[in-house]
Amino acid sequence: MKKLFFVGWMLIAGVVAAMAQDYSLINHNVVPFALNPAQAGNANATRFALSFRQQWPQLANHFTTARVSFDRPFYKRMCSLGLAYNYDDYAGGVYRTNDFAAVYAHTFELTENSFFRLGLQGSLFVNHFGFDKLEYGDQYDKTNGRIDPNTIEDFDKTTCTFFDFSAGMTYYIENKFSIGGAVYHIAEPENGFMDKSANALNRRFVVHANYMHDLIYGNGLWGRNDLSDKYLYLNANYQTQADWQTAYLGLGLYLAPVVLGVSERTNLDEVYTTAFQLGCTYKGLQVYYTFDLFTSDKLNGSWSHQIDLIYIIQIKEKYPCPMVYW
């Protein structure tokens, strides 16, 4: 029973002091503009996406994350708009995050096949603290070992609502290479359930890179920019937020219609996970399943899985013409 109370108070301390860490996906690279708002519209098509992830699902207090998004370019594909909704739940609903985001991205042409993109994101967060889902020390009756339903514990609020802003940039060579970075929670908004100045949502910094090597047209980084239905890809990213950090490295192969991938993720200390990805494509539909294993020596982790569905509708322009960029 004492252990239960200790765990409960540790959860409260984390929630009240501030939920300083964002949700995390196994594979951000297949989720549209999840790493960087500048990636909105980069499919040059109308794109719908749905992602669902469960971490340690066999545990009662597992993590559940879901994301729905839409994005598409407009005005000669120079401008792009994106909308996203993210839901994150952990500890059986003790803490739930709802994030509604709108993104604008702008493309600048540098050379015929290389571009620079800027992205801005505005978000509305509505977070809930399940106060009634926890048990507190004063509810424990030592005489009979029962839990009394009443407690004197109280919080200033159980719902926290605030606006947030993020920005990013990326440079890319069409169908070849991209590199970029983003900053989330620029203003570090208040994100707690008690009126304390320490409840800031810390900034999250992201850097990422991606390389694609076509197995048919492979003429090097500066060669032919056509992309066939057979290619290799390599992607990497690093994220840090307050005391939390994670590094990711992934390698994949696309042999239409099948996608195979493997990746490694670590906090650069003692936590390591290895993930395996299987995907397939059919016309505009893309389906991915990713399964990761906790491979660290520490025995405090388990497996997780993620499902991603993406549907792409190619844009038909009434008057086709070369793209014009500012």
Image: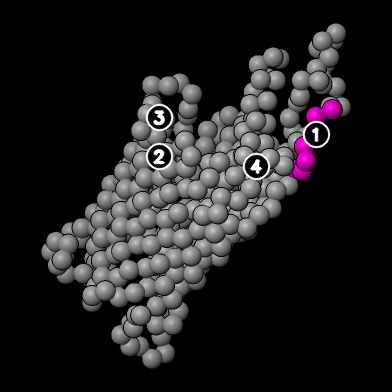
Image marks 2 and 4: residues in contact by CB distance under 8 Å:
no
Which residue position holds label 4? 197
- The reply to whether dot 3 and dot 1 touch (C-beta < 8 Å) is no
Relative side of 56 to 44, left or right? right
Callout 4: helix, strand or loop?
Answer: loop
Circle 3 Cα neighbour tier, 10 Å, few/some/many (<14 / 14–19 / ≥20): some
The percent position of residue 293, horizontal first and vertical second, equals: 41, 33
Separation (CA) of disc 3 from disc 1: 35 Å
Residue drawn where x is 13% and y is 64% of the image = 219
Select label 2 or label 1 by which is in front: 1
Displayed quadrant of residue 282: bottom left
Of residues 145 and 239, which is closer to you in this image? 239
Of circles 2 and 4, the one toward us is: 4
Tell me if residue 273 comes above or below residue 320 in the rendering: above
The crowding category of the residue bearing disc 2, from other C-alpha atoms within 10 Å (few below 14, some 14 to 19, many at least 20), is some
The magenta segment is: 152-158
Q: Position of residue 233 (x, y in %)?
A: 26, 53
Q: Earlier in the sequence, mark 1 or mark 4?
A: 1
Three-letter amino acid code at the position of disc 2: Thr
Report x, y in % for residue 97: 63, 47
Residue on which the image places disc 2 = 246
Q: Nearer the viewer, mark 4 or mark 3?
A: 4
**Real-space Cα distance between discs 2 and 4?**
27 Å
Answer yes or no: is residue 230 visible. no
